[in-house]
Amino acid sequence: MSSQFPVLSSQKDRRSNQDVIRTYTAYLRIGPDKADQVRELCHSTTVFDVGTNYIEINYTGRDTNRFVVAELKKIASVVGDAEGEITCSYQNEAGDPSFEFYTIAGGKLYVQKGVVSRAPTKCEC
């Protein structure tokens, strides 16, 4: 995990967080002994679907206070390790697609940032 960094605090975009629409998707496999604890943590939100040995995440909308990331940190501390990756996609200030890839390991939430960069437009004459 040398290219991954733990998420220490909420990170803000340069433009207003209120303008950013984020899409979170994931299917994480967790130990069946952790499902009840995770379900209890997530009982007040519909973002997380917790099964007997999995967490499914499907959310699109404004995440102004990064509540999804805050909940993922809590989940990480409970499950310890999860198999799978959470993908968050949004448009950066230049309008290009940007991504955050989250993993859970050792009771911590890790993030890798990614951005799609476009080459200059050229004529296909």
Image (tube, helix red, strand yellow):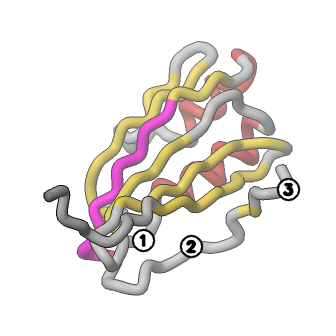
Q: Describe the element under mark 2 as helix, strand or loop.
A: loop
Q: Where is residue 73 in the image (x, y as percent from the top left)?
A: 65, 54
Q: Which residue lies furthest to the front in this view?
A: 125
Q: Describe the element under mark 3 as helix, strand or loop.
A: loop
Q: Which residue, given by chain and number where applicable, does mark 1 sit on?
A: 65
Q: Position of residue 58 (x, y in %)?
A: 37, 37
Magenta: main secondary structure: strand
Location of residue 52 by image quarter? top right
Q: In this view, does 113 lie to the left or right of 83?
A: left
Q: Which residue, given by chain and number where applicable, does mark 3 sit on?
A: 2
Sooner in the amino-acid sequence: mark 2 or mark 3: 3
Q: Do the residues labelled 1 and 2 touch (CB within 8 Å)?
A: yes
Tag shown at residue 10: 2
Q: Mark 3: give few (<14), some (14-19) or many (20+) Cα within 10 Å.
A: few
Kind of residue indicated by mark 1: Asn
Q: In this view, does 70 lie above or below 76?
A: below
Separation of residues labelled 3 and 1 (CA atoms): 28 Å
Q: Mark 2: give few (<14), some (14-19) or many (20+) Cα within 10 Å.
A: few
Separation of residues labelled 2 and 3 (CA atoms): 21 Å
Kind of residue indicated by mark 3: Ser
Magenta residues, as a range? 18-26
